[in-house]
Amino acid sequence: MQSGGVRRTSFALMRSLEEIGGCVEVDARIKSNPLDAAAPRHSKLLTARMVAADTRREILGDPSARVVHSLYFDHAMLASKRPVALTVYDMIHERFGFGSWILPAMKRVLVGRADVVIAISQTTANDAQQYFPGVKKVEVIPLAVPDEFVNTPRDPAANRQFVLHVGQRRRHKNFSILLDAYRISPALRALPLVCVGGSEMTPEEQGAIVLATGRPADHRMRVSDAELMRLYDNALVAVVPSLWEGFGLPVIEAMVRRTPVACSDAGSLAEAADGHAALFDPVSAEDCAAAILRSTTLNDEALESAQAYASMFTWRRYAAAHMALYSAME
């Protein structure tokens, strides 16, 4: 939670590729302080020799490179004479019209250049083909959770006692439906709400939370992975109410910590949950409240099944899938 999802994913991929022997060289600044240090200027553009270089010229001119992979939307990939892979995380900007027109326009150009688009879910793959019908090829490589989430034992003193929301609260995140669920459900109002991540809460947001829950806002804007794991371990349920997601990482994070999940059935969330979460209609507060309360009744067998499923989403597996793709592109 100390770094944005794309940046975090990019660094984790580079480190994991190096660990599995994927002919990787990673900038020393990434090795020494991957999340808190300033990002190397061009760390989002890699080659199949995976050099995170200080100049685009070094990356694109590297004679030993076989494939160029842009981990975000770096226009330098347009100059590459080698096969190009481009990771696409979601189509939120296109679907909801957020922000400037510049990013969607650049995305369209780069998708058109890419020999392979790497989508982080089948939902994102379908969206890419819908919004960019000229895309050449799409491969699905789902995201992963940090090894610590999988390997760290659950907090033995965990005492499930609150509802947890992890992530931004922008319009497509649909945070308001969670507050609406609190307003209409006396059973929910008996449970504290803890929010993690996103930007600093505005006075309006804080007021809305007080009105909905009857308690002051409990917002942890920046937490370490260790603290995030403790929050999952102590949560009665993790709620992901988004109108749309490219993947839905909090679903997997919660499951791998044996935390019940209630999430909307929109976008990739049902795909990520794969039958292990209580689903709800993202525009129905009644359905949201019911799903949250239903998820709190899951037994140990159901939680163990969800944990076993989520534990497959490892960085090693994520990196190995990329190496296989690079080899196929040569």
Image (cartoon, rainbow, N blue to C red):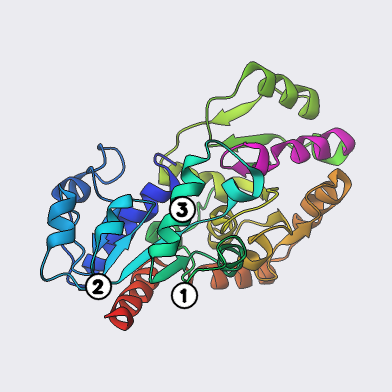
Q: Quadrant of the N terminus?
A: top left
Query: Residue drawn 14% across and 53% down?
Result: 57
Query: Residue drawn 39% across and 41% down?
Result: 3
Instruction: Tell me which numbered mark, 2 or 1, is placed earlier along the sequence.
Output: 2
Residue corresponding to mark 1: 137
Which of 329 and 250 lies nearest the eye of the viewer?
329
Q: Quadrant of the C terminus?
A: bottom left
Residue corresponding to mark 2: 20
Find residue 210 and name its label: none
User: Is residue 163 among what the camera can see?
Assistant: no
Q: CA distance from mark 2 to mark 3?
A: 30 Å
Q: Position of residue 303 (x, y in %)?
A: 64, 66
Residue corresponding to mark 3: 107
- Range of magenta residues: 165-185
Q: Amino acid at mark 3?
A: Lys
Q: Quadrant of residue 80?
A: bottom left
